[in-house]
Amino acid sequence: MKLEEDAYGQEMWAYYKGEESFEIVERDDGYFDALPGSPRVYFSSYESWSHLDKKAMEFVKGRVLDVGCGAGRHSLYLQKKGFDVLGIDNSPLAIKVCKLRGLKKAEVMSIEEVNFKPETFDTILMMGNNFGLFGSFKKARRLLKRLHRMTSKNALIIADTRDPYKTENPAHLEYQEFNRKRGRMSGQLRIRIRFKKYVTRWFDYLIVSKEEMKEILKGTGWKVKEFIDSGDSSYITIIEKETTDAPRAQKAE
């Protein structure tokens, strides 16, 4: 990734240096949103986390892969607790910030590039709405099967997302209808991040309901173990391996 395209990393780098920082999300229908609390939340300590984040940490075990680690808040917390954690992010500046903050193992890597040997990890962490990094229904299933191969027998995926249908915003409801008409999932967002003069490339970001989550997991070797609810649209899913054989290969995917 070129530095001029690393808007996400630039905002964190600015915040790390004590400069003004913010995050603007642009959607492909022309909708813009300023994310409240960003990037401050990426640097937040355990004490200020939501009850969802705190509860999710109770399920972490063994060797951890933190996908889309950002500024490293979850990785650093788990590292301090004695876990063997590898934080990955496709943003070079985010990884630079992680290392400067003390994360011992951090690499520039996108979720598409993840491909480790079998039994490498016991926990896959996808916090901060990072289930969205799966991007689409087919891509999620393909990557879930890959994660199945590189994790231990009793591994877990801890994934944060939100239900796209729990909104009354007319612009969001219109966008969901727009998505369905073009053959996409309702919550399959096409977005890019802006910060000052920096802007990322367009990418797909997937938010799903609980029923859609279950449908995506079918045949991948994973199943829902538990949902952790927030009381609003956000929720965390604890995903465990099925006791049956490895995921089935499907030509359509």
Image (tube, rainbow, N blue to C red):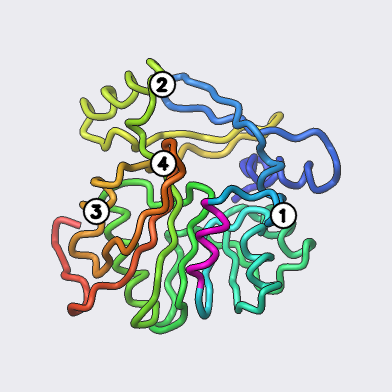
Q: Which residue is mark 4?
A: 162
Crowding at dot 1, Cα within 10 Å, few <14 / some 14-19 / many 20+, comes out as: few
Tell me the element at label 2: loop
Q: Residues within 10 Å of mark 2 (few under 14, many from 20)?
A: few
Inspect the image, locate mark 1, and give the three-letter code of the amino acid beneath it.
Answer: Ser
- The residue located at (42%, 82%) in the rendering is 117
Q: Predominant secondary structure in magenta?
A: helix
Query: What's under tag 3, amino acid-wise?
Result: Lys
Label located before the other in sequence (4 or 3):
4
Tag 3 near tag 1, CB within 8 Å: no
Return the residue found at the far left: 251
Q: Residue at x 70, y 54 (%)?
A: 47
Q: Disc number at residue 214?
A: 3
Q: Earlier in the sequence, mark 3 or mark 1?
A: 1
Point out which mark residue 45 bears. Answer: 1
Horizontal side of residue 83 vs 234, given as left or right: right
Distance from disc 3 to disc 1, alpha carbons, whole Å, reads 31 Å
Mark 2 or 4, closer to the camera: 4
Pointer 2 residue: 29
Specify which label sits upstream in the sequence, 2 or 4: 2
User: Where is residue 87 drawn, in percent x and y?
Assistant: 60, 66
* Residue 181 image point, x, y percent: 21, 25
Q: Is disc 1 placed on a helix, strand or loop? A: loop
Position of residue 179 measured from the top left corner of the image (x, y, whole percent): 28, 29
Q: Which residues are magenta?
A: 52-60
Contact flag, marks 2 and 3 (Cβ < 8 Å): no
Give the residue displayed 44% in from the left and 61% down from the top: 158
Which SS class for mark 3? helix
Query: Does residue 198 appear anywhere in the picture?
Result: yes
Q: Are marks 1 and 2 in contact (CB under 8 Å)?
A: no
